[in-house]
Image: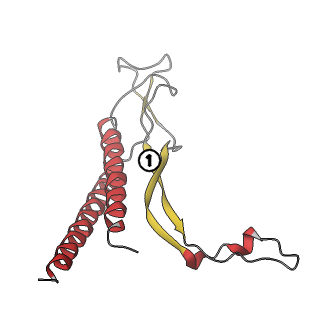
């Protein structure tokens, strides 16, 4: 892998962690929002990530008749990561919190108020983890930059 690809990988990691921080902040901001119906209640959101892979060129493996077999042609040892991509943001399927509060202005006819399925402790843990992952990607990019600067000074 060339050194310049490190910047793309670290950059994609920083973008992913920024999205993770934003969804966590949105979850925390809506943690105490109230609704009188299940359908209108805020649901916790989580980003879904996947690696971006690059296949190296390799000779195709063929069967006895000379046809390429795509199943045996793929060798996981010849795959390299090129970063992370965001596949989407999904809503949590955890149950909502129904509380009996008949005096609440948002209570439905049965006296229930619905709160989001946001776990504040879990969200704070995610926020710390995303922040540290972001910082790690920044350090990787800075280290790669320092290495490239050292390479430039080798010829002097």
| Position of residue 34 measured from the top left corner of the image (x, y, whole percent) | 37, 27
The residue carrying mark 1 is 46
Visible in this render: residue 120? no
- Percent of width and height locating residue 4: 32, 67
Q: Is residue 135 left or right of residue 122?
A: left
Q: What residue is at 49 percent from the left and 60 percent from the top?
A: 52
The residue that appears at 31% across and 50% down in the rendered structure is 18
Image height of 107 relative to 142, above or below: above
* Quadrant placement of the C terminus: bottom left
Please give left or right for residue 101 compared with residue 154 in the image.
right
Farthest residue in the right direction? 65
Locate residue 2 relative to residue 64 in the image: left or right: left
Whether residue 24 is visible, yes or no, is yes
Up the image or down, 105 lies above or below 140; here it is above
Location of residue 69 with respect to 11 vertically, above or below: below
Could you tell me which secondary element the residue under label 1 belongs to? Answer: strand
How was this image coloured? secondary structure
Tell which of 129 and 28 is nearer to you: 129
- Binning the other alpha carbons within 10 Å of mark 1 as few (below 14), some (14 to 19) or many (20 upward) gives some
């Amino acid at each position: 892998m060339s050194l310049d690809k490190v910047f793309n990988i670290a950059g994609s990691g920083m973008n992913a962690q920024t999205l993770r921080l934003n969804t966590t902040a949105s979850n925390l901001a809506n943690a105490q929002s109230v609704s009188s119906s299940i359908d209108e209640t805020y649901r916790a959101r989580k980003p879904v990530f996947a690696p971006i892979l690059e296949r190296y060129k390799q000779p195709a493996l063929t069967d006895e008749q000379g046809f390429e077999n795509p199943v045996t042609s793929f060798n996981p040892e010849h795959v390299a990561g090129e970063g992370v991509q965001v596949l989407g943001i999904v809503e949590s399927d955890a149950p909502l919190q129904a509380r009996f509060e008949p005096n609440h202005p948002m209570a439905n006819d049965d006296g229930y108020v619905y709160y989001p399925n946001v776990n504040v402790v879990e969200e704070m843990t995610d926020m710390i983890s995303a922040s540290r992952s972001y910082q790690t990607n920044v350090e990787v990019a800075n280290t790669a930059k320092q290495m490239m600067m050292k390479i430039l000074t080798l010829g002097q």
